[in-house]
Amino acid sequence: MNLPERPITILIAALGGEGGGVMADWLMHAATECGYPAQATSIPGVAQRTGATTYYLEIYPEKRDRLGGRAPVLSLTPSPGNVDIMVASELVEAGRAMQNGYIDPSRTTLIASTHRIYATAEKMQMGDGRFDSERVVDAARELAKRAVLFDMRKLAQESGTVINAVLFGAIAGSGVLPLPREACEAAIRHGGRGAEASLRGFAAGFDIAAGARPAPAAPVPPKRATELTEILRIGKERLEDYQGAGYARLYEERMQPFLAGDPKLAAEVARHLALWMAYEDIIRVADLKTRASRFERVRREVGARDGEPVLVIDYLKPGVEEFASVLPAFLGRRLVSWAERRGKLDAYNIGMHIKTSSVLGYLLVRALAWLKPWRPRSYRYGEEQRLIGRWLALVSDAAARDTALALEIAMCAGLIKGYGETHRRGKANFLAIIDALVENPPTSDAREQAAAIRKAREAALADPEGKALGATLGKPVVWLKQVART
Amino acid sequence: MELQFTKEIGSLRLGNGDTFHGEGILAVTKALLQSGVSYVGGYQGAPVSHLLDVMVQARDYMDELGVHVEACTTEAAAAAMLGASINYPARGAVTWKSIVGTNVAADALSYLASAGVMGGTLIVLGEDYGEGGVVAQERSHAYALKSLMWLLDPRPNLETIVDMVEHGFELSEASSTPVMMELRIRACHVRGSFKTKANRAPAVSKKHLLEGPPREFIYDRLAHPPATFRQEKLKSDVRLPAARKFVVEQRLNEIFPGNENVGIVVQGGLYNTLMRALKTLGLADAFGASRIPIFALNVVYPLVPEEITAFCASKKAVLVLEEGQPEFIEQEIAMFLRRAEVGAKLHGKDCLHMAGEYTAEAMVRGLSKFLAQEAPHLDVSRAKQWLERVEGVRAKASELLAALPPRPPTFCIGCPERPVFSAMKLVAQDIGRPHVSMDVGCHAFASFEPFSQGNTLLGYGMSLASAAGVAPMSARRPVAVMGDGGFWHNGLLSGVASNLLNRGDGVLFIMKNGYASATGTQELLSSPPEDARSRSLGQSAAHADRTIESTLKGLGVKWLRTVDNYKVGEVAKAYKEAMTSPGKGLKVIVAEGECQLERQRRLRPAVANQLSAGKRTVRVKYGVDEDTCTGDHSCIRVSGCPTLTVKDNPDPLRRDPVATVIDGCVGCGLCGENAHAAVLCPSFYRAEIIQNPSGWDRLVSQVRRLFA
C-alpha cells in the first residue's frame, strides 16, 4: 500500500493569552476524531506573561486503521524547511518565523494576522520606532508558497471571540489539512464554553482563507499633510482656534519669506511653526480637555455603549513652570529663575485627580481655558515667541546658503515637545544643537554642517539621558534638573 | 492556582484498558498511581508544575487512594521527603525543575543515595535544557554519576514514558537506589495517548498504616560514619550490578535494527528528532524503519557494558548522540569499547556541537559528517540540498527584513510588580543607578526593556545573599529584589538571616504578590486567606496576610516598610529613604499587591454574573488624550504595560505616533500614577463606565451633559 511520505506539520507562533493552547487542542481533537495519528507539543515558557510562545503539531494524513498496526514516529520539534503550515498570530512573529527558516517557498502555507502588537523596544522610542509592517507583508508574499494574510484580530473582535478561532478557521480553510470543516467545528463544540462565538470567528477565517469571501480592507491610516497649501490651511485654522485671527495672521506673516523659496523647506517650516505656535500650555490643555468632542472620543475609546454614563477623571500635576507660564512675564521670569537656582522646578507640583466630567471639575478646568485672552501677556508666550523668532531667523539665513542645511535646522524644532521635564530636555537638546552646530558651526561647508545637524538630531532621539547627543557633540547636554542637582 | 484541572483529574481515575488522552507530564502522574505510589512531593516549576498541581487539586481522590501529597517549600524538602522509603516499603515520587531543583536538593539526595532505599523512589526532573529553557543551562546527568543514582531518559511518547515510570520503581527496588527520570520541555507537554491500567492501592499509605517504626535499630540505614564508608562500596559492588541486571532483563533499552554496518547510540529523549533527521537524509521512513541500526537508551545511567559492546561489536563505526556537555555517555562508551577491545570507531562530539540543544538540523549536519567518513557509499546529497535550501531561505529573510524587534516576556497587564520598577527607575534618575541583584521569579522581567536593570542573578531566593559581598565595597547601597516565593524558598535564611548575623547593609524589596506566580500561582505560606480573597474580588487581598512582616520583625529587621505598589510616589519615597538614610543596616520594603492573574480570575466571573443580573457595575479603563499627547513616549519608558502602546498620530501635522491604551486594560491605574510620580504629562485620564446605570446615574449624567 502506498502510504503518505511524511506527516503534515503545523507550527504556531502566538503570544500569551491568545488561546494558542486551545487551538492546538482543537486541531488534535479534530485529527484524532478523524482517525489520523496526531501529536502536539509546545514551548509555553512564560506564555501567560505576554511572551512569544510556540505550538507544534504533526498529523499523519492516513487513517490509523489503514496503517496495519504501525504508528508513525512524529517529531516534537519543528525543523526549518519542513513546515507545511506556519501560523503567526501577529505580523512581526511571522517575520521571525521567516528568519528562522520555517517558511519554505515550495512547501509552506503562511497564515498570519496582519495586525501589530508593538514590542516594548518599538514603542518606547522617543520618536517613531515601529517596524515597517509592509516589509513583513512583502517578504511573506515572496517567501511563502501561499500567504494568507489579513487582520484576524479585527475579525475576532467583530465575532466577539479570541483570535485563535479565526486562525483555526483560516488553517481549515487553507485546504492543506485532511480535516473536513465539520470535524473542525465539532472540535470547537466539544471544547464547550464560548463555542458559538468561536464558531463565528472560525467561519470568518475559513471563508476568507478558502477564497469564498474577501479579506477585510486594511484600515486607512490617518492622513498626513504634506503639501504646503494644505499645511498652511491647517496651521491657520489651528492657530485661529488657539489664539484668534490675529495670531493666525502672525503665522502667515512669519511664513511669508519662505513661500517664494523651496517648497519642501517651506512645507517643513510651516508644519513645525504651526505646531510650535500652538504650544501646549495649561490653557491649551484645559481647553482641549473640556470640549464636547473630547468626551465623545473618550466614550468611543473606552467602548461605552449608548446609555452608559462615563465619568472622566484627569490626572494633572501642575508645578512651578505651569504656574509661571500664565503669570505676567516679569513675575514668571523671576519665579522660574528662582526655582532654577534653588533646584525647585519639580518641588511643588500638586497632583490632582479632577473629575472633568462632573459639573465642578468641568468648571474648574474650563476656567483655566478662559484665560486664553490673557495668554499673549504671559511669561511663557514671550519665551516661546522669542525662541521661535530665533529659530526662524536661523532657518532663513541658512536658506540663503543651502536649502538642505535650512531644512535640517527647520527639523530641529521637532525636538521640542511634551511637558515638564520632557519639554525641558527637548528644549535643551534643541539649544545644544543650535549652539554647537548652527550658531557656532565647526565647518564652513554647508553639506557637512547639514549632515552633522542630522546626526545630532538623531542622537538626541536615541536616548532620554542625552548620552548619544553628548557623545555626538563632544560635550554633555545638561538640562535644568541636572544643573540644579550638582 | 492558575489552571483548573477538572478534566485531567477525571482521567487520573481511568481503569484497565481505557485510553488516556493528554499531556506527557499528566501521563506521568497517572503512571505514579498505577505504580502504587504512597506519597508524592515536589516543588513547582515549568515544565513539571502540572504533575503536582493536578495532585494538589485532586486531593479528595488522593485521600480516597490514601496517597499523601505534599507541596514542599523547596526541592531540598522534597528530596528529604524521600527518606520515608529508606526504612519502609513505601513507593515515593517527587518532582522539580532541573538543573536548579536538583542543585537545591543535592544535599539530601547525596544522603538518600548513600543510605539506599527499600521502597522504590522516583524523581521526575523537568530537564530545562535548550529552547524554552529559563535556567542556567546544565545537564542533570552529572548528579546521577556522582551519587550513583540511575537516570532514565525515555523515548518521548506516552507509552514509553508511562512504562519507564512503572519500571523505574521496580529498578529502584531491585537495586535499592533512587531513580531519576529526565523529561525535556517538549516531552512534558507532548499530547498523546496510552492504554491505562487501574490504579494500585499503595502497600503503605494513609489507609494502610505502618505498624510502627522499624523494630530494630539498623545503623546501616543512617548515612552517617562509619556506615557511609560501607554504603559507598555497596553502590558499585552491589547496587550497580543489580541495576544493570534489571536493565538487561527487562530490556529497558531498545535496539532498532538496520542493514548498514555503522550504528547510532542515542539518548531515548532524542529518538524522535533523530528519526526526523534520518528521514530528511533519506535513510528512514515515517514509521521509524531505519537503514542504520539504532540503540536507544531509555536508561542513560547506568550503561550496561555488555549491551554497548554487543551493539558495537559487529560495526565499523558508531555515532553517539548525546545532548549537552560534557560527553559523559560517549566517554563511558569509549571506555567500554577499549576495555573489551571492540574495534568500532567512536564518533560523537567530533561530528556535532558540544553545547546546546540537538535539533533535527544539527543532527542532519552531524549525521552527514559521520556518514561521509564511515559510510561514504550512502547517498546523502538530499541532506546537503536541504541544508543549502534552508540557509538560502534564512539569508533571503534576513535580507528582506533586517533586524526585527525582540519580544521578550514582560509583566502581565496590571501586574503589581511593574509599579515598583517604575519607582526604582524614577528614583535612579535622582540618585543614580544602584547595583541591583535580581532573583528568580516574574520580577526578573525587569531585566528587559524598559527597565533594563539588574547586575547579578544567582538563583532562587539568592538576591540578598548575592549582594553581601557587594555592599561593603560600594559607595552606594546595593538593592536586592526578591519575590515572596523566593523569600520562602531560600531568601529568608540565605539572605535575611545571613545579613542580620553579619550586621550587613543594603536594601531588600520583597514582592508580596501572594503566590509563587511565575510557576502558576501556587500557594505560599503567606498567601492571603480564602475569605479575604473572596471579599476582595478585583482588589488586592495581599494585605490580609502579614506572615512575611511578622517573620522579618521576629528575626530582628529594624527598618521595615510595607508599601502599596500602585502608589508609585509612595514606593519611590520609601525606596529613596531606604537608599539614602544614614544608618547602616538592612532596610526591607515589602511591596504589596496581589498577583493580577488571581484577581482577574476572581473578578471576571463575578462581573459577568453581576452584569447578567442587571446590577450596576463600574468598569474602569485608562486612556490617553490623543490631542494633548506629543508622542515622546516617556510614559511607556516607565511602564512597559502591554496595553499602553502607540498608534498613528491623528494630527495631520505630526509624525510621531501617540500613546494609547488598548483593550485589555484592567484599570490598575499605573499609567496615571506614573504620570503623576514622574510629572510626565496631562494626557492620562481614568474613565469609569457605569454599566446597568441606576436612575440617579442617568439623571446626573444628563445634568453634566448640559455643561460638556
Image (cartoon, coloured by chain):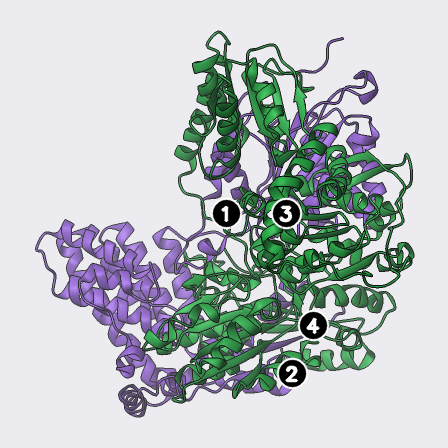
Tell me the kind of residue under disc 2.
Ser
Give percent across and percent down for residue B546. 67, 81
Separation of residues labelled 3 and 4 (CA atoms): 24 Å
Point out the image quarter for the N terminus of chain B: bottom right
Marks 1/3 same chain:
yes
In space, the residues marked 1 and 3 are separated at their CA atoms by 13 Å
Residue at image point 34% right, 68% down:
A276
Q: Which mark is residue B585?
A: none
- Chain shaded green: B
Task: Give the left or right position of residue A402, taking residue A125 as reference.
Answer: left
Which residue occupies the foreground of this view, B680 or A362? Answer: B680
The amino acid sitting under disc 4 is Leu
Badge nearest the viewer, 3 or 2: 3
CB under 8 Å between callouts 4 and 1? no
What mark, if any, has residue B126 been given in the picture? Answer: 3
Mark closest to the chain's N terminus, 4 or 1: 1
Query: Label 4: chain?
Result: B
Query: Rounded to the nearest whole Å, what is the CA distance between mark 2 and mark 1?
Result: 58 Å
Q: Nearer the viewer, mark 2 or mark 1?
A: 1
Q: Secondary structure at mark 1?
A: loop
- Dot 2 corresponds to which residue? A358
| Distance between the alpha carbons at the discs numbered 2 and 4 | 45 Å
Q: Mark 1 or 3 closer to N-term?
A: 3
- Chain holding disc 3: B
Camera sees residue B452: no
Is disc 2 in the same subunit as disc 1?
A: no
Is A122 placed left or right of A168 in the picture? Answer: left
Residue at which label 4 appears:
B525
Among the two numbered marks 3 and 4 on one chain, the one whose residue lies closer to the N terminus? 3
Which secondary structure, mark 3?
A: strand
